Image: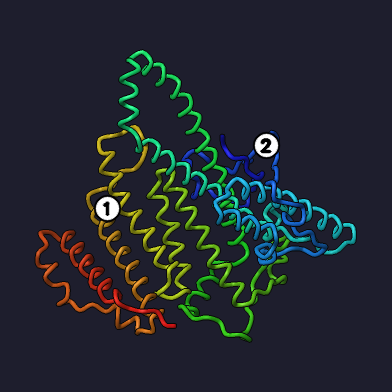
Amino acid sequence: MAAPGPSSPQTTKETPSAHDPKADITEVPPAQSNDHAASPPANATADTTVDASNSTPTYHQTKKSKAYTVAKALLQDGSLEDALSTLELALQCSLQNLTKLNTANADGQDEGVGDDGAGLELHESLAPLYYLYGTTLLYSVEESDVMMANKNGGGGDQDVDDSAEQGGEEEENSNENEEPQESSAAVDTDEDLQIAWENLDIARAIVTRMISEEEIQSYLQSHSGSVAEEGEATIVLKSNVLTEDEVKSSKGTYSPEEFKELVLDLALIHIRLGDLLRANGRNLDAIPDYKRALELRSCLGKFDRAVADSHFGLASTYAESVDLNESTQGSESDGKSRLTQEEIGQFQELSLHHYLECGVALTGLIAELCGKNPNRIITVEEKEVGVAAEAASSDVTKSSNVRSQTLATLRQRVLDFQPLE
């Protein structure tokens, strides 16, 4: 059964159709009907689900709230259903709190809580909850897919033997009973992916309203892996306000740490959007999200696990795109675009490039942890891989051989490294 999701706001200010996992969707529909009421897990209480306050909550306060902390702990423990229930209740209570604050401020003729004219459902304080709900639901789908694959793959011979013993008639009846169940499971998965996408894309839309692209690019250019020192000047940026006229005069203030957190959270949202599109078989559409995440994570420097993760995601997506293209050759009914021979060559080269960059990032990280000079460790002389290049029969094979030999060389260099005590 599809997991009930928190109601998703509809807005015409920003249509996130570019990230939609279904090609025919052009707007964000409600994620759940009124029949799905959120119910907290057995270990959740009112004071652990939402932090009530008389002041307007912020994005960073939500990430420190009991609701967010409890839900994240449940996710890490693998209690996905409890995490989803906790987040549903947190979203409902947070919206109620925002509505009360907005009404109180209006009665007192004070400035409202600020929603950029898009509704309280898009308030910045809700973005962490939307993200965590979307990514938790996506984990649930991914886990179900793995479990189903293991079920179908494991014990397959025994199933065949049992069917043979029961006779052809019983096997036919069994297949007839299984078809509706498989169809229902597919529908539930599609619904869950849709709800997960809605929540992730809403989180993306909120964060991109909090910090502009110009501000992000300026930050990335000046923070190529550097960490802000204590006492460094704060960064003044725009915040959620009620009208475009107020944007020019109303400013929000983020510390360097808070701004970096927003940038990295946005990268994580794009990672999960890419994961979702891949889960839906839309590898080509996932590539821009992974590339965006890699760009945003450049502020961490070259030698970072998150950077390596982004390279690996791109590498595997390029490789899978080529494999999917080859496996569907001759099919004209699935509506998916085909890669040209030139694009196949480019994707193969890009896949090899990002696999190598993933290895370089991890090698440099290991070197740093062990007190070595990472730039020296990752430098591989041409003569060290020359034999592999000469043995190649084509440009693609040559590139593959060179990169494979380079990775082998890097692995060998860090094999005996010991971390600093």
- In depth, the one of 209 and 123 nearer the eye is 123
Q: Secondary structure at mark 2?
A: loop
**Picture quadrant of residue 265:** bottom right
Residue 139 at x, y percent in the picture: 51, 49
Image quadrant in which the N terminus is located? top right
**Tag 1: amino acid:** Glu
Q: Pointer 2: what residue?
A: 36
* Residue 150, horizontal then vertical, whole percent: 39, 41
Quadrant including the C terminus: bottom left
Pair 2/1: label in front: 2
The vertical placement of 317 against 247, above or below, is: above
How many other residues sit within 10 Å of disc 1, few (<14), some (14-19) or many (≥20)? Answer: few
Instruction: Work out which residue is located at the far right of the displayed protein and give it.
Output: 108
Q: CA distance from mark 2 to mark 1?
A: 45 Å
Q: Which label sits on residue 343?
A: 1
Amino acid marked by disc 2: His
Q: Position of residue 364 (x, y in %)?
A: 36, 76
57 left or right of 154?
Answer: right
Q: Quadrant of residue 326?
A: top left
Describe residue 172's horizontal placement relative to residue 197 as left or right.
Answer: left
The residue that appears at 82% across and 58% down in the rendered structure is 101
Instruction: Kindly identify the residue that appears in the image at 26 percent across and 57 percent down.
Output: 346
Between residues 253 and 60, which one lies in front from this camera angle? Answer: 60
Q: Position of residue 42 (x, y in %)?
A: 69, 46
Q: Is residue 10 visible?
A: no
